[in-house]
Every structure is written in C-alpha cells, then in structure tokens.
Amino acid sequence: MKKTIVENIYNWYRQTIRHPKYRWLIVLGTLLYLVGPVDISPDVFPIVGWIDDTVVATLLVTEVSQMLLESRKNNKNKQSDPQPNTIDVDAVSAN
C-alpha cells in the first residue's frame, strides 16, 4: 500500500525524536516552529492557520509523553528486578 506524504513525515518525526542523538534538536526545532512566524499555513488566516500548529504541538506532546512513560516503565522494571542471590560467608584461615 502506498504511503502518503503525511504518513512519511509522521514516521520520520517519530523515529528521529526517539533517536537520542537528535531528540533535543527535534524538540527545539518543533518549539521554534510553533513560536516562529514561518508556517506551512500562516496564522494570519483564522482557524486554517492554527491547524498546522495544533497538529505539530499534538505530535510533540504525544511523542514526548510516550518517551517519558516508556522511560518511567523501564526504570520501574529495573528497580523491581530481583537482585541475584548472594551468600554471606565468613572467611576462616586454614592454618
């Protein structure tokens, strides 16, 4: 099945934001896009101009919250893993 350009952009964004090397660049770029004057559809046009900002903001919040939840889940699993059994033995000299 042929993917649309929107699906391709979404998949690229999602993969790139999950890559530790590029994560903060994508987050910063997204925030700059949201506050900057350059848009796909300018905010001068009511409603239509806000749609792209809403979609981008929703995408950012969704991906960052999913990463935080996964990180929290991984940390919780690491803490709940049982420690290996250890036996405390007193050393005795064999003289």
Image (cartoon, rainbow, N blue to C red):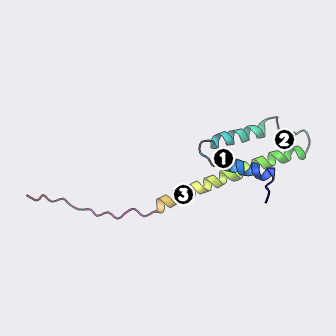
Give the residue number, with chain letter if any, for mark 3: 74
Question: Range of the magenta residues?
Answer: 81-92
Which image quadrant for residue 49?
Answer: top right
Q: Residues within 10 Å of mark 3 (few under 14, many from 20)?
A: few
Specify the farthest residue to the top.
37
User: Is residue 11 in sight in this rendering?
Assistant: yes
Question: From mark 1 to mark 3, how far is it between C-alphas?
Answer: 18 Å
Numbered disc total: 3
The tag on residue 17 is: 1
- Residue visible at 91% across and 44% down in the picture: 46
- In the picture provided, is 91 more to the left or to the right than 16? left
Residue type, label 1? Ile
Q: Residues within 10 Å of mark 1 (few under 14, many from 20)?
A: some
Decide which of tag 1 and tag 3 comes sooner along the chain. Answer: 1
- Residue visible at 77% across and 37% down in the picture: 35
Q: Answer yes or no: do the residues labelled 1 and 2 have beta carbons within 8 Å?
A: no
- In the picture provided, is 2 more to the left or to the right than 15? right
Which quadrant of the rendered structure holds the C terminus? bottom left
Q: Answer yes or no: do the residues labelled 1 and 3 have beta carbons within 8 Å?
A: no
Q: Position of residue 70 (x, y in %)?
A: 60, 56
Q: Is residue 62 magenta?
A: no
Q: Main secondary structure of the magenta part?
A: loop
Which mark's residue is nearer the viewer, 1 or 3?
Answer: 1
Q: Position of residue 72 (x, y in %)?
A: 57, 56
Which quadrant of the rendered structure holds the N terminus? bottom right
Q: Is residue 84 magenta?
A: yes
Residue type, label 2? Ile
- Residue visible at 83% across and 39% down in the picture: 39
Residue type, label 3? Asn
Q: Answer yes or no: do the residues labelled 3 and 2 have beta carbons within 8 Å?
A: no
Give the residue number, with chain letter if any, for mark 2: 40
- Residue visible at 72% across and 52% down in the picture: 11
